[in-house]
Image: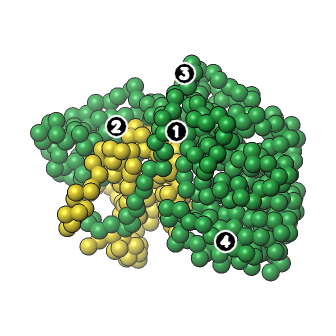
Chain colours: A green, B yellow
Amino acid sequence: MPASLCILFKHLSYTVSRRCLIHPSPSPLTLFLTSHKARDCSPWDPRSITAKLSTSSSTPTNTESLTSPFLSVHIRCPKDAADMLSEALLCFGASSTSMDEEDAFENSDKIFINTIFPEGEDVNMCISHASNSIGMKEIPDYEVKMDEQHEWIKKTQESFHPVEVTEGIWIVPEWRTPPNIQATNIILNPGLAFGTGEHPTTKMCLLLLHSIIKGGELVLDYGTGSGVLAIAALKFGAASSVGIDIDPLAITSARQNAALNNMTPDKMQLHLVSGESCPPLMDAKTCGVVEEQKSNGMGVISGREKYDVVIANILLNPLLDLADDIISHAKHGAIIGLSGILSQQLPYIVERYSPSLEGISVSEMDGWVCVSGRKTRNLADC
Amino acid sequence: MSTLKEILTRRPVAATIRLTVPAGGARPAPPVGPALGQYRLNLMAFCKDFNARTQKYKPDTPMAVTITAFKDNTFEFIVKSPSVTWYIKKAAGVESGSSRPGHEVASTITLQHVYEIAKDRVGELG
Protein backbone atom coordinates (compact mmCIF):
# COMPACT_ATOMS: atom_id res chain seq x y z
CA MET A 1 0.00 0.00 0.00
CA PRO A 2 1.47 3.36 -0.96
CA ALA A 3 2.66 4.94 2.21
CA SER A 4 3.71 8.39 1.19
CA LEU A 5 1.31 11.18 0.61
CA CYS A 6 1.22 13.44 -2.36
CA ILE A 7 -0.30 16.50 -0.81
CA LEU A 8 -1.78 17.11 2.63
CA PHE A 9 -4.17 19.94 3.18
CA LYS A 10 -5.67 21.38 6.25
CA HIS A 11 -9.03 22.91 6.12
CA LEU A 12 -10.95 24.70 8.76
CA SER A 13 -14.60 25.31 8.97
CA TYR A 14 -15.76 28.81 8.29
CA THR A 15 -19.08 28.54 9.99
CA VAL A 16 -19.75 31.33 12.36
CA SER A 17 -21.28 30.12 15.58
CA ARG A 18 -24.13 32.45 16.20
CA ARG A 19 -27.50 31.73 17.58
CA CYS A 20 -30.11 31.98 14.93
CA LEU A 21 -33.65 30.93 14.46
CA ILE A 22 -34.55 28.39 11.90
CA HIS A 23 -37.27 29.99 9.89
CA PRO A 24 -40.32 27.73 10.25
CA SER A 25 -41.26 27.80 6.60
CA PRO A 26 -43.31 24.94 5.27
CA SER A 27 -40.72 24.00 2.71
CA PRO A 28 -37.24 24.75 3.97
CA LEU A 29 -35.70 22.55 1.37
CA THR A 30 -36.66 24.43 -1.79
CA LEU A 31 -34.39 23.28 -4.54
CA PHE A 32 -33.46 26.08 -6.84
CA LEU A 33 -33.47 24.77 -10.32
CA THR A 34 -37.13 24.35 -10.91
CA SER A 35 -38.23 27.23 -13.10
CA HIS A 36 -37.62 30.76 -14.15
CA LYS A 37 -40.41 32.19 -12.07
CA ALA A 38 -39.31 34.86 -9.64
CA ARG A 39 -39.87 32.85 -6.51
CA ASP A 40 -40.66 29.21 -6.61
CA CYS A 41 -41.55 27.79 -3.24
CA SER A 42 -42.91 24.45 -4.30
CA PRO A 43 -42.58 21.77 -1.67
CA TRP A 44 -39.45 19.85 -2.11
CA ASP A 45 -40.49 16.66 -3.80
CA PRO A 46 -37.95 14.61 -5.71
CA ARG A 47 -40.49 13.47 -8.29
CA SER A 48 -41.63 16.96 -9.11
CA ILE A 49 -38.07 18.14 -9.40
CA THR A 50 -37.18 15.48 -11.92
CA ALA A 51 -40.30 16.33 -13.92
CA LYS A 52 -39.43 19.99 -13.91
CA LEU A 53 -35.87 19.29 -14.90
CA SER A 54 -36.97 17.57 -18.04
CA THR A 55 -39.37 20.31 -19.14
CA SER A 56 -37.23 23.30 -18.37
CA SER A 57 -35.95 24.57 -21.66
CA SER A 58 -32.59 25.83 -20.68
CA THR A 59 -31.40 23.02 -18.50
CA PRO A 60 -28.54 21.16 -20.10
CA THR A 61 -28.15 17.43 -20.32
CA ASN A 62 -25.98 17.19 -17.28
CA THR A 63 -28.57 18.31 -14.75
CA GLU A 64 -29.45 14.67 -14.45
CA SER A 65 -26.33 14.37 -12.40
CA LEU A 66 -27.66 16.87 -9.91
CA THR A 67 -30.28 14.67 -8.36
CA SER A 68 -29.17 11.49 -10.06
CA PRO A 69 -30.08 8.49 -8.03
CA PHE A 70 -27.28 6.55 -6.50
CA LEU A 71 -27.10 3.29 -4.66
CA SER A 72 -26.13 3.39 -1.03
CA VAL A 73 -24.68 0.11 0.16
CA HIS A 74 -23.47 -0.76 3.63
CA ILE A 75 -20.80 -3.43 3.57
CA ARG A 76 -19.78 -5.23 6.69
CA CYS A 77 -16.18 -6.32 6.68
CA PRO A 78 -13.33 -7.17 9.05
CA LYS A 79 -11.52 -4.10 10.31
CA ASP A 80 -8.08 -5.13 9.16
CA ALA A 81 -9.23 -5.48 5.57
CA ALA A 82 -11.37 -2.34 5.55
CA ASP A 83 -8.85 0.12 4.12
CA MET A 84 -7.79 -2.22 1.35
CA LEU A 85 -11.36 -3.13 0.52
CA SER A 86 -12.31 0.55 0.34
CA GLU A 87 -9.60 1.25 -2.18
CA ALA A 88 -10.45 -1.86 -4.18
CA LEU A 89 -14.12 -0.89 -4.30
CA LEU A 90 -13.19 2.43 -5.87
CA CYS A 91 -11.22 0.63 -8.55
CA PHE A 92 -14.14 -1.61 -9.39
CA GLY A 93 -16.92 0.91 -9.81
CA ALA A 94 -17.81 2.54 -6.49
CA SER A 95 -18.14 6.34 -6.50
CA SER A 96 -17.13 6.70 -2.88
CA THR A 97 -16.58 4.81 0.36
CA SER A 98 -16.67 6.02 3.91
CA MET A 99 -16.05 4.51 7.30
CA ASP A 100 -17.43 5.93 10.50
CA GLU A 101 -15.12 5.97 13.49
CA GLU A 102 -18.00 5.27 15.84
CA ASP A 103 -18.66 1.92 14.27
CA ALA A 104 -15.17 0.90 15.20
CA PHE A 105 -16.10 0.47 18.81
CA GLU A 106 -19.42 -1.26 18.51
CA ASN A 107 -18.51 -4.49 16.80
CA SER A 108 -15.32 -6.05 17.95
CA ASP A 109 -13.73 -6.87 14.65
CA LYS A 110 -16.14 -5.71 11.97
CA ILE A 111 -16.75 -2.29 10.52
CA PHE A 112 -19.24 -0.89 8.05
CA ILE A 113 -18.04 0.56 4.78
CA ASN A 114 -20.73 2.91 3.51
CA THR A 115 -20.36 2.72 -0.23
CA ILE A 116 -22.03 4.77 -2.90
CA PHE A 117 -22.44 3.43 -6.41
CA PRO A 118 -23.74 5.18 -9.50
CA GLU A 119 -27.18 3.99 -10.53
CA GLY A 120 -27.09 0.97 -12.77
CA GLU A 121 -23.83 -0.39 -11.44
CA ASP A 122 -23.79 -4.10 -10.72
CA VAL A 123 -23.18 -3.92 -7.01
CA ASN A 124 -22.74 -7.60 -6.45
CA MET A 125 -20.17 -7.93 -9.19
CA CYS A 126 -18.21 -4.95 -7.98
CA ILE A 127 -18.08 -6.10 -4.38
CA SER A 128 -17.20 -9.58 -5.49
CA HIS A 129 -14.32 -8.40 -7.68
CA ALA A 130 -13.10 -6.01 -5.03
CA SER A 131 -13.04 -8.53 -2.22
CA ASN A 132 -11.51 -11.10 -4.52
CA SER A 133 -8.76 -8.74 -5.58
CA ILE A 134 -7.54 -8.30 -2.02
CA GLY A 135 -7.63 -11.98 -1.24
CA MET A 136 -10.79 -12.21 0.82
CA LYS A 137 -12.19 -15.73 0.81
CA GLU A 138 -15.85 -14.76 0.71
CA ILE A 139 -17.91 -11.81 -0.38
CA PRO A 140 -18.68 -9.71 2.69
CA ASP A 141 -22.26 -9.17 3.82
CA TYR A 142 -23.87 -6.06 2.50
CA GLU A 143 -27.15 -4.22 2.56
CA VAL A 144 -28.53 -1.87 -0.06
CA LYS A 145 -30.35 1.14 1.36
CA MET A 146 -32.83 2.92 -0.83
CA ASP A 147 -33.98 5.70 1.47
CA GLU A 148 -30.86 7.80 1.62
CA GLN A 149 -31.21 9.59 -1.69
CA HIS A 150 -31.73 13.11 -0.45
CA GLU A 151 -30.48 13.02 3.12
CA TRP A 152 -27.28 14.64 2.07
CA ILE A 153 -28.98 17.63 0.49
CA LYS A 154 -30.96 18.24 3.66
CA LYS A 155 -27.87 17.91 5.82
CA THR A 156 -25.88 20.22 3.59
CA GLN A 157 -28.51 22.90 3.76
CA GLU A 158 -28.73 22.56 7.51
CA SER A 159 -25.09 23.42 7.79
CA PHE A 160 -25.50 26.89 6.25
CA HIS A 161 -25.72 29.60 8.85
CA PRO A 162 -25.76 33.37 8.53
CA VAL A 163 -22.27 34.74 8.04
CA GLU A 164 -21.16 38.23 9.02
CA VAL A 165 -18.60 39.19 6.42
CA THR A 166 -17.77 42.44 8.11
CA GLU A 167 -19.62 44.72 10.43
CA GLY A 168 -23.06 45.39 9.05
CA ILE A 169 -22.86 42.94 6.16
CA TRP A 170 -24.44 39.52 6.49
CA ILE A 171 -25.07 36.66 4.15
CA VAL A 172 -28.15 34.78 5.27
CA PRO A 173 -29.51 31.52 3.88
CA GLU A 174 -33.04 31.85 2.62
CA TRP A 175 -34.48 29.64 5.32
CA ARG A 176 -32.99 31.46 8.28
CA THR A 177 -33.86 34.76 9.89
CA PRO A 178 -31.27 37.52 9.60
CA PRO A 179 -29.69 38.03 13.03
CA ASN A 180 -29.58 41.78 12.42
CA ILE A 181 -32.48 43.18 10.46
CA GLN A 182 -30.82 46.59 10.18
CA ALA A 183 -27.69 45.30 8.53
CA THR A 184 -27.10 44.86 4.82
CA ASN A 185 -28.40 41.34 4.42
CA ILE A 186 -27.73 39.36 1.30
CA ILE A 187 -30.23 36.52 1.19
CA LEU A 188 -29.00 33.44 -0.56
CA ASN A 189 -30.25 30.06 -1.52
CA PRO A 190 -26.85 28.66 -2.26
CA GLY A 191 -28.22 25.71 -4.17
CA LEU A 192 -25.36 23.94 -5.80
CA ALA A 193 -23.45 26.91 -7.16
CA PHE A 194 -20.35 28.47 -5.65
CA GLY A 195 -20.68 31.40 -3.35
CA THR A 196 -22.22 31.01 0.05
CA GLY A 197 -20.24 33.73 1.70
CA GLU A 198 -18.33 31.40 3.95
CA HIS A 199 -15.29 30.91 1.79
CA PRO A 200 -12.32 33.24 2.37
CA THR A 201 -12.25 34.17 -1.32
CA THR A 202 -15.89 35.23 -1.29
CA LYS A 203 -15.27 37.23 1.87
CA MET A 204 -12.23 38.96 0.43
CA CYS A 205 -14.10 39.85 -2.74
CA LEU A 206 -17.00 41.20 -0.73
CA LEU A 207 -14.66 43.32 1.33
CA LEU A 208 -12.99 44.59 -1.84
CA LEU A 209 -16.32 45.52 -3.39
CA HIS A 210 -17.38 47.20 -0.18
CA SER A 211 -14.30 49.37 -0.19
CA ILE A 212 -14.29 50.38 -3.85
CA ILE A 213 -17.95 50.90 -4.64
CA LYS A 214 -18.92 54.50 -4.05
CA GLY A 215 -22.23 54.50 -5.90
CA GLY A 216 -23.34 54.35 -9.51
CA GLU A 217 -20.80 51.86 -10.84
CA LEU A 218 -21.34 49.29 -13.55
CA VAL A 219 -20.12 45.97 -12.22
CA LEU A 220 -19.23 42.74 -14.02
CA ASP A 221 -19.16 39.53 -11.97
CA TYR A 222 -17.13 37.20 -14.15
CA GLY A 223 -17.99 33.66 -13.07
CA THR A 224 -20.91 34.66 -10.92
CA GLY A 225 -21.81 31.30 -9.39
CA SER A 226 -24.62 31.96 -6.93
CA GLY A 227 -24.57 35.63 -7.85
CA VAL A 228 -23.45 36.67 -4.38
CA LEU A 229 -20.90 39.24 -5.56
CA ALA A 230 -23.18 40.78 -8.19
CA ILE A 231 -25.95 41.12 -5.62
CA ALA A 232 -23.62 42.51 -3.00
CA ALA A 233 -22.32 45.14 -5.42
CA LEU A 234 -25.85 46.38 -5.93
CA LYS A 235 -26.49 46.45 -2.20
CA PHE A 236 -23.33 48.51 -1.75
CA GLY A 237 -24.62 51.11 -4.20
CA ALA A 238 -23.61 50.07 -7.70
CA ALA A 239 -25.91 51.20 -10.48
CA SER A 240 -26.17 47.80 -12.07
CA SER A 241 -24.51 44.39 -12.09
CA VAL A 242 -23.99 41.88 -14.83
CA GLY A 243 -23.16 38.32 -13.87
CA ILE A 244 -21.83 35.79 -16.37
CA ASP A 245 -21.02 32.13 -16.01
CA ILE A 246 -20.46 29.07 -18.17
CA ASP A 247 -22.50 26.86 -15.85
CA PRO A 248 -26.26 26.91 -16.45
CA LEU A 249 -26.88 25.80 -12.87
CA ALA A 250 -25.03 28.84 -11.65
CA ILE A 251 -27.14 31.19 -13.75
CA THR A 252 -30.33 29.57 -12.51
CA SER A 253 -29.14 29.83 -8.92
CA ALA A 254 -28.11 33.45 -9.42
CA ARG A 255 -31.51 34.31 -10.90
CA GLN A 256 -33.28 32.92 -7.91
CA ASN A 257 -31.01 34.79 -5.55
CA ALA A 258 -31.49 38.01 -7.47
CA ALA A 259 -35.23 37.58 -6.96
CA LEU A 260 -34.78 36.77 -3.26
CA ASN A 261 -33.04 40.12 -2.89
CA ASN A 262 -35.62 41.96 -4.97
CA MET A 263 -33.22 42.77 -7.76
CA THR A 264 -35.08 43.75 -10.91
CA PRO A 265 -33.73 42.90 -14.37
CA ASP A 266 -32.70 46.48 -15.04
CA LYS A 267 -30.42 46.36 -12.03
CA MET A 268 -29.07 42.86 -12.43
CA GLN A 269 -28.61 40.85 -15.59
CA LEU A 270 -27.33 37.33 -15.82
CA HIS A 271 -25.96 35.63 -18.88
CA LEU A 272 -24.92 32.13 -19.69
CA VAL A 273 -21.81 32.25 -21.78
CA SER A 274 -20.07 29.60 -23.82
CA GLY A 275 -17.24 27.77 -22.16
CA GLU A 276 -14.78 28.59 -24.91
CA SER A 277 -12.68 31.66 -24.42
CA CYS A 278 -13.16 34.44 -26.92
CA PRO A 279 -10.27 35.33 -29.14
CA PRO A 280 -8.96 38.56 -27.69
CA LEU A 281 -9.22 40.75 -30.73
CA MET A 282 -12.78 39.86 -31.61
CA ASP A 283 -15.63 41.98 -30.46
CA ALA A 284 -17.88 40.25 -27.95
CA LYS A 285 -20.79 40.38 -30.39
CA THR A 286 -19.17 38.07 -32.88
CA CYS A 287 -18.05 35.66 -30.22
CA GLY A 288 -21.35 33.87 -30.00
CA VAL A 289 -21.21 34.62 -26.36
CA VAL A 290 -24.70 35.27 -25.15
CA GLU A 291 -27.72 33.02 -24.87
CA GLU A 292 -31.05 34.64 -24.39
CA GLN A 293 -32.96 33.63 -21.31
CA LYS A 294 -36.74 33.84 -21.41
CA SER A 295 -37.37 35.62 -18.17
CA ASN A 296 -34.74 38.19 -18.95
CA GLY A 297 -36.27 39.13 -22.25
CA MET A 298 -33.33 41.00 -23.66
CA GLY A 299 -30.13 39.76 -25.13
CA VAL A 300 -27.75 42.31 -23.72
CA ILE A 301 -24.19 41.62 -24.58
CA SER A 302 -21.49 42.13 -21.99
CA GLY A 303 -19.44 44.60 -23.96
CA ARG A 304 -15.86 45.64 -24.15
CA GLU A 305 -14.50 48.43 -22.00
CA LYS A 306 -17.82 48.98 -20.39
CA TYR A 307 -17.43 48.23 -16.69
CA ASP A 308 -16.17 50.28 -13.74
CA VAL A 309 -15.53 47.16 -11.69
CA VAL A 310 -14.73 43.66 -12.93
CA ILE A 311 -14.58 40.96 -10.28
CA ALA A 312 -13.59 37.36 -11.04
CA ASN A 313 -13.57 34.81 -8.25
CA ILE A 314 -12.87 31.60 -10.12
CA LEU A 315 -9.72 29.44 -10.35
CA LEU A 316 -6.12 29.82 -11.44
CA ASN A 317 -6.38 28.26 -14.90
CA PRO A 318 -9.43 30.17 -16.12
CA LEU A 319 -7.96 33.39 -14.71
CA LEU A 320 -4.83 32.82 -16.76
CA ASP A 321 -6.55 31.57 -19.91
CA LEU A 322 -9.20 34.29 -19.90
CA ALA A 323 -7.04 37.19 -18.71
CA ASP A 324 -7.48 38.96 -22.04
CA ASP A 325 -11.22 38.66 -21.91
CA ILE A 326 -11.50 39.69 -18.28
CA ILE A 327 -9.34 42.76 -18.74
CA SER A 328 -10.98 43.80 -21.99
CA HIS A 329 -14.34 44.21 -20.28
CA ALA A 330 -13.01 46.86 -17.95
CA LYS A 331 -12.90 50.58 -18.73
CA HIS A 332 -9.60 52.35 -18.56
CA GLY A 333 -8.91 53.06 -14.90
CA ALA A 334 -11.45 50.52 -13.69
CA ILE A 335 -10.72 48.24 -10.77
CA ILE A 336 -10.19 44.57 -11.54
CA GLY A 337 -10.42 42.09 -8.67
CA LEU A 338 -9.31 38.46 -8.94
CA SER A 339 -9.59 35.61 -6.48
CA GLY A 340 -10.00 31.86 -6.12
CA ILE A 341 -6.25 31.52 -5.99
CA LEU A 342 -4.03 29.98 -3.39
CA SER A 343 -1.09 31.92 -2.02
CA GLN A 344 1.36 29.74 -3.90
CA GLN A 345 -0.43 30.47 -7.19
CA LEU A 346 -0.15 34.24 -6.74
CA PRO A 347 3.08 34.72 -8.77
CA TYR A 348 1.41 33.34 -11.92
CA ILE A 349 -1.48 35.74 -11.64
CA VAL A 350 0.74 38.72 -10.97
CA GLU A 351 2.95 37.83 -13.90
CA ARG A 352 0.01 37.52 -16.26
CA TYR A 353 -1.90 40.60 -15.15
CA SER A 354 0.78 43.10 -14.21
CA PRO A 355 1.25 44.41 -17.76
CA SER A 356 -2.33 45.61 -17.59
CA LEU A 357 -2.73 46.64 -13.97
CA GLU A 358 -1.20 49.32 -11.84
CA GLY A 359 -1.31 49.74 -8.09
CA ILE A 360 -1.66 46.03 -7.55
CA SER A 361 -2.62 45.13 -4.01
CA VAL A 362 -2.98 41.69 -2.51
CA SER A 363 -5.04 40.58 0.46
CA GLU A 364 -4.68 37.19 2.05
CA MET A 365 -6.96 35.04 4.16
CA ASP A 366 -6.40 31.44 5.29
CA GLY A 367 -4.01 30.61 2.46
CA TRP A 368 -6.15 32.22 -0.25
CA VAL A 369 -5.41 35.55 -1.91
CA CYS A 370 -7.31 38.31 -3.63
CA VAL A 371 -5.54 40.58 -6.14
CA SER A 372 -6.78 43.96 -7.27
CA GLY A 373 -5.50 46.78 -9.42
CA ARG A 374 -6.47 49.53 -11.83
CA LYS A 375 -6.57 48.79 -15.53
CA THR A 376 -4.09 50.67 -17.64
CA ARG A 377 -4.47 48.90 -20.97
CA ASN A 378 -5.65 45.71 -22.65
CA LEU A 379 -3.33 42.73 -22.58
CA ALA A 380 -3.52 42.58 -26.36
CA ASP A 381 -2.04 46.06 -26.57
CA CYS A 382 1.01 45.23 -24.47
CA MET B 1 5.80 9.60 14.65
CA SER B 2 3.39 12.06 16.25
CA THR B 3 4.59 14.40 18.93
CA LEU B 4 2.86 14.40 22.28
CA LYS B 5 1.42 17.79 21.50
CA GLU B 6 -0.04 16.52 18.25
CA ILE B 7 -1.66 13.62 20.02
CA LEU B 8 -3.17 15.81 22.70
CA THR B 9 -4.56 18.37 20.26
CA ARG B 10 -5.77 15.86 17.70
CA ARG B 11 -9.40 16.42 16.82
CA PRO B 12 -11.77 13.48 17.19
CA VAL B 13 -12.32 11.82 13.84
CA ALA B 14 -15.84 11.16 12.67
CA ALA B 15 -15.15 9.27 9.44
CA THR B 16 -12.71 8.47 6.65
CA ILE B 17 -14.08 9.05 3.15
CA ARG B 18 -12.52 7.91 -0.09
CA LEU B 19 -13.60 8.95 -3.54
CA THR B 20 -12.45 9.72 -7.04
CA VAL B 21 -12.92 13.25 -8.32
CA PRO B 22 -11.85 14.72 -11.68
CA ALA B 23 -9.04 17.27 -11.29
CA GLY B 24 -10.47 20.78 -11.29
CA GLY B 25 -13.97 19.39 -11.64
CA ALA B 26 -15.35 18.89 -8.15
CA ARG B 27 -19.04 19.84 -7.98
CA PRO B 28 -21.38 19.65 -5.02
CA ALA B 29 -23.46 17.06 -6.93
CA PRO B 30 -22.94 13.27 -6.71
CA PRO B 31 -20.45 11.68 -6.13
CA VAL B 32 -19.05 14.44 -3.94
CA GLY B 33 -22.41 15.61 -2.59
CA PRO B 34 -23.70 12.44 -0.94
CA ALA B 35 -20.26 11.30 0.21
CA LEU B 36 -19.47 14.51 2.08
CA GLY B 37 -22.94 15.85 2.70
CA GLN B 38 -23.92 13.03 5.01
CA TYR B 39 -21.21 14.18 7.42
CA ARG B 40 -22.30 17.81 7.14
CA LEU B 41 -19.01 18.88 5.62
CA ASN B 42 -18.88 22.13 3.73
CA LEU B 43 -19.25 20.93 0.14
CA MET B 44 -18.51 24.28 -1.40
CA ALA B 45 -15.33 24.69 0.58
CA PHE B 46 -14.13 21.23 -0.37
CA CYS B 47 -14.89 21.77 -4.06
CA LYS B 48 -13.19 25.15 -4.19
CA ASP B 49 -10.18 23.87 -2.25
CA PHE B 50 -9.85 20.69 -4.27
CA ASN B 51 -10.29 22.45 -7.60
CA ALA B 52 -7.76 25.12 -6.76
CA ARG B 53 -5.18 22.59 -5.63
CA THR B 54 -5.63 20.33 -8.68
CA GLN B 55 -5.24 23.15 -11.22
CA LYS B 56 -1.84 21.84 -12.20
CA TYR B 57 -3.21 18.45 -13.34
CA LYS B 58 -4.72 17.79 -16.72
CA PRO B 59 -8.43 18.64 -16.35
CA ASP B 60 -10.73 15.74 -15.55
CA THR B 61 -7.92 13.36 -14.56
CA PRO B 62 -9.56 11.19 -11.89
CA MET B 63 -7.81 11.97 -8.64
CA ALA B 64 -8.02 9.69 -5.61
CA VAL B 65 -9.05 11.74 -2.58
CA THR B 66 -9.06 10.62 1.04
CA ILE B 67 -10.94 12.92 3.39
CA THR B 68 -10.74 12.80 7.17
CA ALA B 69 -13.93 14.26 8.59
CA PHE B 70 -13.73 15.46 12.17
CA LYS B 71 -16.59 15.48 14.64
CA ASP B 72 -16.75 19.28 14.55
CA ASN B 73 -17.57 19.16 10.80
CA THR B 74 -14.13 20.33 9.77
CA PHE B 75 -12.01 18.18 7.49
CA GLU B 76 -8.63 17.56 5.94
CA PHE B 77 -7.96 15.85 2.65
CA ILE B 78 -5.17 14.24 0.73
CA VAL B 79 -5.06 14.04 -3.05
CA LYS B 80 -3.24 11.36 -4.97
CA SER B 81 -2.83 10.95 -8.69
CA PRO B 82 -4.90 8.24 -10.37
CA SER B 83 -4.54 4.58 -9.60
CA VAL B 84 -2.21 2.50 -11.72
CA THR B 85 -5.28 0.70 -13.05
CA TRP B 86 -6.53 3.94 -14.56
CA TYR B 87 -3.20 4.69 -16.22
CA ILE B 88 -3.02 1.23 -17.70
CA LYS B 89 -6.56 1.36 -19.04
CA LYS B 90 -5.89 4.78 -20.53
CA ALA B 91 -2.67 3.65 -22.16
CA ALA B 92 -4.37 0.54 -23.51
CA GLY B 93 -7.38 2.50 -24.70
CA VAL B 94 -9.93 0.26 -23.02
CA GLU B 95 -12.75 0.95 -20.58
CA SER B 96 -12.26 -2.18 -18.53
CA GLY B 97 -9.93 -5.09 -18.24
CA SER B 98 -10.51 -8.49 -19.75
CA SER B 99 -13.59 -10.31 -18.53
CA ARG B 100 -11.54 -13.48 -18.48
CA PRO B 101 -8.17 -12.62 -17.05
CA GLY B 102 -5.50 -15.11 -18.03
CA HIS B 103 -7.56 -16.32 -20.95
CA GLU B 104 -8.61 -13.35 -23.01
CA VAL B 105 -6.50 -10.37 -23.87
CA ALA B 106 -8.35 -7.05 -23.69
CA SER B 107 -5.61 -4.87 -25.14
CA THR B 108 -1.88 -4.31 -25.12
CA ILE B 109 0.43 -1.57 -23.93
CA THR B 110 4.04 -0.94 -24.77
CA LEU B 111 7.07 -0.95 -22.51
CA GLN B 112 7.23 2.80 -23.06
CA HIS B 113 3.75 3.05 -21.51
CA VAL B 114 4.87 1.07 -18.49
CA TYR B 115 7.92 3.27 -18.08
CA GLU B 116 5.85 6.48 -18.25
CA ILE B 117 3.32 5.18 -15.77
CA ALA B 118 6.02 4.13 -13.35
CA LYS B 119 7.67 7.51 -13.67
CA ASP B 120 4.42 9.30 -12.86
CA ARG B 121 3.73 7.12 -9.87
CA VAL B 122 7.23 7.05 -8.44
CA GLY B 123 6.39 10.10 -6.39
CA GLU B 124 3.71 8.09 -4.60
CA LEU B 125 6.00 5.45 -3.21
CA GLY B 126 8.26 5.37 -0.18
- Taking depth in this image into account, of B5 and A110 the one nearest to the observer is B5
Neighbour tally class for label 3: few under 14, some 14-19, many 20 plus, Cα within 10 Å: few
Q: Chain of mark 4?
A: A
Name which of mark 2 and mark 3 comes first in the sequence.
3
Name which of mark 3 and mark 4 comes first in the sequence.
3
According to the picture, the residue beneath numbered tag 2 turns out to be: A123
Q: Amino acid at mark 3?
A: Pro
According to the picture, the residue beneath numbered tag 1 turns out to be: A161
Task: Report the residue at 22% width, 57% height from top.
Answer: B8
- Taking depth in this image into account, of B77 and A4 the one nearest to the observer is B77
Name which of mark 1 and mark 2 comes first in the sequence.
2
Q: Which image quarter holds the N terminus of chain A?
A: bottom left
Give how far apart the Cα atoms at labels 2 and 4 are. 53 Å
Front: mark 1 or 2: 1
Is A287 displayed left or right of A66 in the figure? right
Circle 2/circle 4 CB separation < 8 Å: no
Q: Amino acid at mark 1?
A: His
Q: Amino acid at mark 4?
A: Ser
Name which of mark 3 and mark 1 comes first in the sequence.
3
* Disc 1 with disc 2 on a shared chain: yes
Rendered image quadrant of residue A256? top right
Q: Secondary structure at mark 2?
A: helix
Q: Please determine whether, in this image, residue A335 is positioned above or below residue A269.
A: below
Is A328 displayed left or right of A373 in the figure? right
According to the picture, the residue beneath numbered tag 3 turns out to be: A24
According to the picture, the residue beneath numbered tag 4 turns out to be: A361
Front: mark 2 or 3: 3
